[in-house]
Structures are given as C-alpha cells and as structure tokens.
Image (cartoon, rainbow, N blue to C red):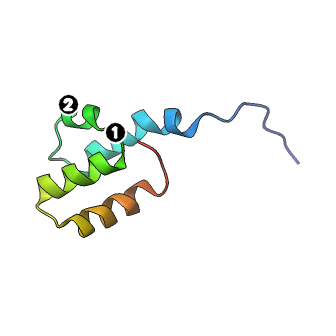
C-alpha cells in the first residue's frame, strides 16, 4: 500500500480557478469578467439562465450536473 504524504488541498481554493476555466469552455457566451465576478453556484445559475434563456429549473440542473459538488 502506498501512502500519499502531501496535504489535501482545500477544495474550494483548488477547484476555483480550474472550474472557472471549465465554465468558460462549457458556456462560451460568458465574458472573462462575468466569470471572474461569479461568487457561488447561485450566481452561475443566474448567469446561465440569463445568457442562454433557460428557465431557472433547467439552468439549475445544468449547473448541478456540471459542478457535481465542487465549489466555485
């Protein structure tokens, strides 16, 4: 059995910048500034809903499927 002695990174800090790059790749209508201004998943839902003219429930499902428990 191997042991990983490296500390586990804080998920919210580790996934933030990478997740923002993935948001840009998935939802190409966002500007860099709009992505930088996102504070949480609720902000992302609102932006997806607005940019892609989706109802709130569909935007929430899309973001939930994308985020899978990751923090923005």
Circle nearer the viewer, 1 or 2: 2
Q: Nearer the viewer, residue 58 or 22?
A: 58
Task: State the residue at coordinates (33%, 37%).
Answer: 39
Q: Residue furthest right?
A: 1
Q: Position of residue 64 (x, y in %)?
A: 39, 61
Tags 1 and 2 touching, CB below 8 Å = no
Q: Position of residue 17 (x, y in %)?
A: 40, 33
Which residue is labeled 2 in the image?
Answer: 33
- Name the disc covering residue 21, or none: 1
Task: State the residue at coordinates (47%, 58%).
Answer: 68
Separation of residues labelled 1 and 2 (CA atoms): 12 Å
- The residue tagged with tag 1: helix, strand or loop? helix
- The residue tagged with tag 2: helix, strand or loop? helix
Categorize mark 1 by other alpha carbons within 10 Å: few (<14), some (14-19), many (20+). Answer: few
Q: Is residue 65 left or right of residue 33?
A: right
Q: Position of residue 12 (x, y in %)?
A: 50, 38
Categorize mark 2 by other alpha carbons within 10 Å: few (<14), some (14-19), many (20+). Answer: few
Task: State the residue at coordinates (27%, 54%).
Answer: 45
Numbered circles on residues, count: 2
Q: Is residue 25 left or right of residue 31?
A: right
Q: Position of residue 15 (x, y in %)?
A: 48, 39
Q: Is residue 49 left or right of residue 67?
A: left
Q: Nearer the viewer, residue 12 or 14?
A: 12
* Nearest to N terminus: mark 1 or mark 2: 1
Task: State the residue at coordinates (12%, 52%).
Answer: 51
């Amino acid at each position: 059995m191997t042991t990983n002695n490296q500390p586990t990174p804080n998920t919210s800090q580790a996934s933030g910048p990478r997740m923002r790059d993935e948001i840009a790749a998935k939802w190409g209508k966002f500007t860099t500034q709009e992505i930088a201004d996102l504070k949480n998943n609720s902000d992302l839902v609102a932006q997806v809903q607005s940019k892609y003219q989706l109802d709130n429930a569909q935007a929430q499902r899309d973001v939930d499927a994308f985020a899978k428990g990751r923090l923005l």
